[in-house]
Image (cartoon, helix red, strand yellow):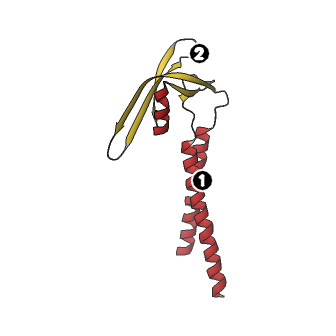
Amino acid sequence: MLAIGALVLSVALVVALHLWAWSGWRATRPWSDGVRLVVAVVDREASTGPRSDLHRVTVLVPDGVRADGPQRRVRFDVDRATYDAAASGELEVEIDGTDPRRVRIPRNDEWTGRLLAVGLVDLFLVAAALQIRRSVRSDR
């Protein structure tokens, strides 16, 4: 009974891990009607602490679909690489064509990290399954 419980728990954890990776992929794929623009960086803020680093970037984005119209400020919490790239005074952003209020910085670092984690867990599970199979065969 304990073996069945461990197997069910393992399968549930693997499914949850793959769903987590898939949600990361969905969050980083380009929007179908999205428009990518290079916009001006108006502020960069970094606060470092013993347990975490916080990097923020504020950019000016068009307030609507027209790039030459009025602009608004949007602040993002970003990773260190994006923060360093913002030092140039410009960043690429993606604006949702169906809802111009939705803006994001396109990047894949979160997706690749999740993919690496899932890949390592999958490799471990395959190695464990092969080891279990070998031990079962040697017991016969």
Place of residue 86 in the rendered image (x, y in percent of width and height, measured from the top left)? 48, 29
- The residue drawn where x is 59% and y is 51% is 115
Distance of mark 2 from mark 1, alpha carbons?
38 Å
Q: Nearer the viewer, mark 2 or mark 1?
A: 2
Residue ID for mark 1? 18
86 to 25, vertically: above or below: above
**Which amino acid type corresponds to the residue marked 2 in the rendered image?**
Ala
- Residue 14 seen from this side: no
Q: Classify mark 2: residues with Cα within 10 Å, few (<14), some (14-19) or many (20+).
A: few
* First-in-chain label (2 vs 1): 1
- The residue drawn where x is 57% and y is 45% is 111
Place of residue 103 in the rendered image (x, y in percent of width and height, measured from the top left)? 54, 27
Place of residue 2 in the rendered image (x, y in percent of width and height, measured from the top left)? 52, 74
79 and 32: which is toward the camera: 79
Q: Classify mark 1: residues with Cα within 10 Å, few (<14), some (14-19) or many (20+).
A: some
Residue at the farthest left position: 50
Residue ID for mark 2? 67
Disc 2 and disc 1 in contact, CB within 8 angstroms: no
- Residue 18 seen from this side: yes
